Image (spheres, helix red, strand yellow):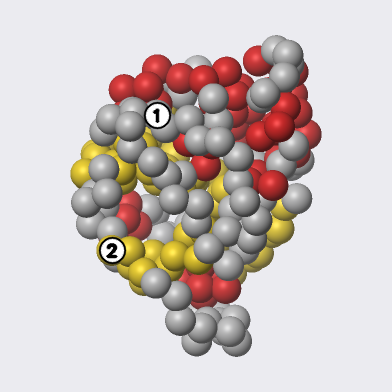
């Protein structure tokens, strides 16, 4: 389920990053990267597979990358049933299987949040909250209107302003698009800092963890 990659600044890049995939420009991601404290070893969570271009991009930083392949997790089927929010949260925590001392500086959600219904999204927030600190930053896609559709695709980071786009390995389930307002209501551990409307009707959003109990 999870893959961990530890990177030292200037380390070598994976050998298959020469493969060509369509790209999508980001106007917000560069500002997110600039706000990271690169003077310390960063802890980064990506909800998705460990794509070589993403590993190559973060090889310029001192960081620990944690990839959680939630797109193939049983959660997407469980949310259709009669599981409670608490049961879903407990399942997500087991799927994460993060060490107790984990504290992420950056979370890359991509469009995964829009594959979760309202109850599962609240459970996801609950399960993730113990691994956040005040100021954890995150990137995600949302929608401006609920009629917007989400393409089934995977994202990598080719450059700070450019995402690579790959087709999914297999067909994904139904989508549950969330507006920016819905995200902050169902994920109270985060505030939306900035949003950018994309040509296809999606919103690219940057979030910061803020509504956390003081330790």
> Residue under circle 1?
178
Horizontal side, residue 73 vs residue 65: left or right: right
Position in image of residue 3 (x %, y %): 71, 58
The residue lying at 72 percent from left, 19 percent from top is: 81
The residue lying at 31 percent from left, 55 percent from top is: 29
Q: Decide if residue 9 is in sight here.
A: no
The residue lying at 66 percent from left, 24 percent from top is: 79
Q: Is the residue under label 2 in contact with that under label 1 (CB below 8 Å)?
A: no
Position in image of residue 200 (x %, y %): 27, 49
Question: Is label 1 in a helix, a strand or a loop?
Answer: loop
Is 185 drawn above or below residue 135 in the view shown? above
Is 55 drawn above or below residue 108 in the view shown? below
Is 167 drawn above or below residue 171 in the view shown? below
Question: Is label 2 in a helix, a strand or a loop?
Answer: strand
Is 2 drawn above or below residue 112 in the view shown? below
In space, the residues marked 1 and 2 are separated at their CA atoms by 22 Å
Residue 25 tag number: 2
Horizontal side, residue 123 vs residue 73: left or right: left
Horizontal side, residue 203 vs residue 151: left or right: left
Position in image of residue 70 (x %, y %): 65, 44
Crowding at label 2, few (<14), some or many (≥20) Cα neighbours within 10 Å? some
Position in image of residue 62 (x %, y %): 52, 66
Q: Decide if residue 194 is in sight here.
A: yes
Give 31 or 144, whichever is nearer the viewer: 144
The residue lying at 53 percent from left, 63 percent from top is: 167
Of labels 1 and 2, earlier in sequence is 2
Horizontal side, residue 130 vs residue 21: left or right: right
Residue 15 tag number: none
Crowding at label 1, few (<14), some or many (≥20) Cα neighbours within 10 Å? many
């Amino acid at each position: 389920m999870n893959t961990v990659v530890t990177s030292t600044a200037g380390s070598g890049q994976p050998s298959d990053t020469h493969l060509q995939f369509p790209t999508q420009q980001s106007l917000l991601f560069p500002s997110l990267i600039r706000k990271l404290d690169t003077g310390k070893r960063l802890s980064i969570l990506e909800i998705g597979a460990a794509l070589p271009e993403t590993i190559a991009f973060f090889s310029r930083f001192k960081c620990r990358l944690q990839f959680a392949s939630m797109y193939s997790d049983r959660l997407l089927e469980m949310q259709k049933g009669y599981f409670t929010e608490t049961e879903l949260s407990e399942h997500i925590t087991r799927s994460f299987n993060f060490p107790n001392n984990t504290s992420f500086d950056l979370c890359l959600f991509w469009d995964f949040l829009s594959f979760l219904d309202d109850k599962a999204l609240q459970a996801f927030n609950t399960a993730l909250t113990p691994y956040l600190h005040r100021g954890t930053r995150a990137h995600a896609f949302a929608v401006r209107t609920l009629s917007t559709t989400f393409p089934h695709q995977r994202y990598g980071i080719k450059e700070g302003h450019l995402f690579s786009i790959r087709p999914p390995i297999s067909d994904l389930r139904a989508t549950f698009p969330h507006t920016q307002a819905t995200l902050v209501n169902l994920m109270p551990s985060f505030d939306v800092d900035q949003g950018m409307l994309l040509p296809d009707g999606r919103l690219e959003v940057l979030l910061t963890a803020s509504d956390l109990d003081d330790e």
